[in-house]
Amino acid sequence: MNFYLTTFFDQDGLPKYYHNKTLPIDINNPAQLIVTLDQFGILNEQDHLAQKVLLWTIHHMQDAKGYFYYQKKRFYKIRIPYMRWSQAWMFYALTTFIIGNKEK
């Protein structure tokens, strides 16, 4: 868990797809962080990291219309709003985060 938390997220909250590369940035990575923290019972303990990653994701991977982009590559973003792949996972992660913070 320590390797995951210290290697797959930079200090600005950018979620990495690989431990040793920044790109591509996939929407499932920030969503998976929230789900993983919740499943391990450490979402509240890691609230600072969770908030930082979610804010980065909202600022860099969310469209003005509200949906989340699938991936960010080096020179472009894949902006297709895949319902099951991108939207469902981020909805699940955001809901889990909100519910987890209400239980504090």
Image (cartoon, rainbow, N blue to C red):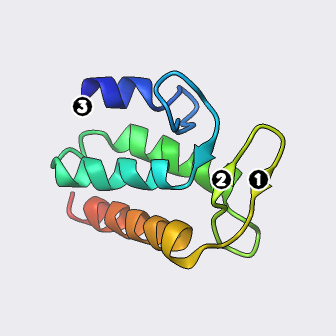
Tag 3 near tag 1, CB within 8 Å: no
The residue singled out by tag 3 in the image is 1
How far across and down, in percent of the image, does residue 29 sit? Answer: 47, 48
State the count of labels. Answer: 3
Q: Residue furthest left?
A: 41
How far across and down, in percent of the image, does residue 104 sit? Answer: 21, 57
Could you tell me the amino acid type at mark 3? Met
- Judged by depth in the image, the label closer to the viewer, 3 or 1, is 1
Circle number at residue 71? 2
Label 3 – label 2 distance at C-alpha? 24 Å
Label 3 – label 1 distance at C-alpha? 29 Å
Tag 1 near tag 2, CB within 8 Å: yes
Label 1 – label 2 distance at C-alpha? 6 Å
Circle number at residue 77? 1
Sooner in the amino-acid sequence: mark 3 or mark 2: 3
Q: Secondary structure at mark 1?
A: strand
